[in-house]
Amino acid sequence: MSAATHSHHGFDPDSLGMPPVYTLNLSASQRSVLEWLTSHGAVFAPITADVEEIAHDCGTSTSTAYEALARLEALQLVDHPDPGSYRVNPRFFFASNPEIRRLVGEALEAPEIILDARAEGPRKVGNVDARRRRTIKAVPDQERES
């Protein structure tokens, strides 16, 4: 889809981007902490994480992990909504995965799927399904008699 198509509908998937990560001059510990949070699902929802565990897994000191988190928060790469809770900014994920960003844009621009009369009608039950249903109904009756 062209950029004109996206702007026509008010959505431009490239606007979800951010500066390339390499331009942020992140330290190795900051990149490591960001990757740890991402790999533990913090892109999809806030996760509860112990900074000592992050530090241990990243091979760094606890104070360095705290400093890394503080810088990531200052850059708004990481949100800290509650004590011990962290979430990676979804823009980081989309910036790191441009093919997914494009797919989201295409999904938002695609026409809605329309149900026709056949889709809205009752589901036809074939002979195999009907026999399977009869068999399933028979099993509980046999168990009750035992």
Image (cartoon, helix red, strand yellow):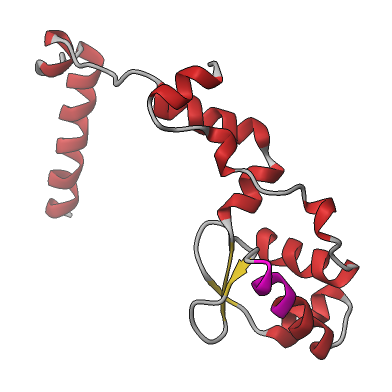
Q: Is residue 119 magenta?
A: no
Identify the residue at horizontal 80%, vertical 59% (top origin): 24
Residue 117, image quadrant = top left
- Quadrant of image for the C terminus: bottom left
Q: Where does residue 104 sit, x and y in percent of width and height?
A: 50, 33
Q: Is residue 138 above or below residue 111?
A: below
Q: Where does residue 38 sit, x and y in percent of width and height?
A: 67, 60
Q: Where does residue 103 sit, x and y in percent of width and height?
A: 54, 28
Q: Where does residue 93 sit, x and y in percent of width and height?
A: 64, 49
Residue 40 left/right relative to 123: right
Residue 120 left/right relative to 128: left
Residue 131, image quadrant = top left
Residue 33 left/right relative to 123: right
Q: Is residue 56 above or below residue 93?
A: below
**Count of residue discs:** 0
SS majority, magenta: helix
Identify the residue at horizontal 68%, vertical 67% (top origin): 75
Which is more toward the observer, 97 or 53? 97
State which region is magenta: 70-75
Q: Is residue 113 above or below residue 93?
A: above
Q: Is residue 73 magenta?
A: yes
Identify the residue at horizontal 55%, vertical 16% (top origin): 2
Which is more toward the observer, 136 or 19? 19
